Image (spheres, helix red, strand yellow):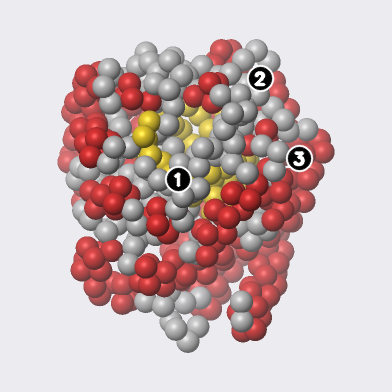
Amino acid sequence: MGIMDSMKSMMMKQAAKLVSNVVRKADIDQFAKLLWTLTKLAKEPAKSGLRHLAEGADRHDPMLVNWVELFNRSNPKVVEKVINNLIINEFAVGEKVRQEKMHELKIVLPKLAIISPTYACNLRCVGCYAALYGHKYQLSKEEVFSVIRQFNDLGIYFFIITGGEPFVYPYFYDILEEFQDSYFMVYTNATMINEDSAKRLAELGNATFAISVEGDEAMTDWRRGKGIYKQVQNAWKLMRENGVIFGSSITATRKNHEMIMDDTFWDYLKESGVSYAWVFQFMPVGADATMELVPTAEQRLERFRKTEELRLGGKFSFVADFWNHGFLSHGCLAAGSKYLHINAKGYAEPCIFQQFAVDNIREKSIVEILSSPFFEAYKRTIPYSENLFRPCPIIDNPKVYRAMVKKFNAIPQHPGSERIINELAPELDQLAADWKVYADKLWYEEGYAEKWPSKRGIYNYETRMRRYENNEEKLALDKKA
Ligand code: SF4
């Protein structure tokens, strides 16, 4: 880093401290004023994003009101890291670097990466592949550090850490300590969080925790094991007391559907301090993959109505239904279009749910993997359907998935991974056909097609350049900045 860059970086850090001090005590109107000031100071592409946020704060968008309340009750270090690492490094500075690198390397780059440093887990949840391995597969500390550094060099500062159970990984805290400028979202069962660790996480500040729940105590304990729900409640309490930001990760199954539809469940999460929620539909990819728990097409539609109401309602800082909100992310995120998954064997999977891979970080650099024929083929094809309510190759466009695996001889990553492309294929085809009926009604008859039009090929560099010729110019980097 040159002297100018070091000075800029120091100034940014100071600015992040100042802003976080203001934000921690601000109400929504003061927050709006702050955002307008930052908009004036910022340059594209951050400027447009900040303006959008400032307009939302002006009209008291419930989601932003929720953010302000969250900042008010969080630990100062936690707020500072959200501002510095997530907003400044990932969204503002990182986006500029990603654009520069995109032109230099001639590949569209992801915005985040998922890393599973280990497959080891202290629980044995129904349908989870991690149950198969014990401590057999794990990345070394050096491998994890090298991967994160390579992503940082590309302007990527946001990482999702999952597994296995991240807290079982012996170097979990080393990651948070070493990469103080990156922000981490950690998917955890929360059973290893105690008073000391909650304090330590608040002092580090650069991670938020998406804690798994399946519904109420009986439902959570059925899938995760007896007594687990009580441990989750205890982790919620400790994180709340220490001002650590946490959310929920909810797997929607055929069995817990009614519970997810019930406001009592969501109200309880809210009262417990949960600030965001990710909803993932159960996928038949784990040990003993079965379609029995996969929600029906009717349930998926009902769930979309519920999660959409929650997303727009502002009860939480955000709510995302991973497949049903595909229109918000322009379809599938896989293969480096928006993210990729480095698994505990070192293989780069297109997505955490696509358990087939071609390349390994032990043989190739991240840039080589991102520009590989396998990933580029995916990126050229996304979105697989113009209807963004059908974003997924696995459950919505299974023929695409099977074709990709076959064409590139992708290696199954777990015993039984192949079942999804052979034995379970007829059932998945039927599920996709059932869902298409509802998805097409939503897309074409409820205004989504007009509001969120799909653009094929934007994750391929040449196509993107052609399509956004003028727009890219607008977003071009201010070299003098
Ligand atoms: S493959 Fe499916 S689950 Fe994975 S990112 Fe794409 S749409 Fe989502």
Indicate which quadrant contains ligand 1: top left
Q: Is residue 415 left or right of residue 85?
A: left
Which numbered tag is attached to residue 271?
none
Position of the N terminus, as image quadrant, is bottom right
SS under mark 3: helix
- Crowdedness of circle 1 by 10 Å Cα count: few (<14), some, many (20+)? some
SS under mark 1: loop
Q: Quadrant of residue 101?
A: bottom left
User: Which residue in the protein does label 3 denote?
Assistant: 198
Which numbered tag is attached to residue 360?
1
Give the camera-side residue of 399 and 478.
Answer: 399
Q: Is mark 2 within 8 Å of ligand 1?
A: no
SS under mark 2: helix
In 3D space, how far apart are the residues under numbered discs 1 and 2 (Cα atoms)?
A: 35 Å
Q: Is residue 373 above or below residue 10?
A: above
Name the residue: 31% across, 77% down. Answer: 473
Name the residue: 56% across, 64% down. Answer: 89
Name the residue: 22% across, 43% down. Answer: 384
Q: Which badge, 3 or 2, comes first in the chain's sequence?
A: 3
Q: Quadrant of residue 320?
A: top left
Give the camera-side residue of 467 and 74.
Answer: 467
- Crowdedness of circle 2 by 10 Å Cα count: few (<14), some, many (20+)? many
| Residue most extreme to the front | 363
The answer to the question of whether label 1 and label 3 lie on touching residues, with beta carbons closer than 8 A, is no
In 3D space, how far apart are the residues under numbered discs 1 and 3 (Cα atoms)?
A: 34 Å
Amino acid of disc 2:
Ile
Amino acid of disc 3:
Ala
User: Which residue in the protein does label 2 denote?
Assistant: 228
Name the residue: 43% across, 15% down. Answer: 288
| Residue most extreme to the bottom | 480
Q: Is mark 3 within 8 Å of ligand 1?
A: no
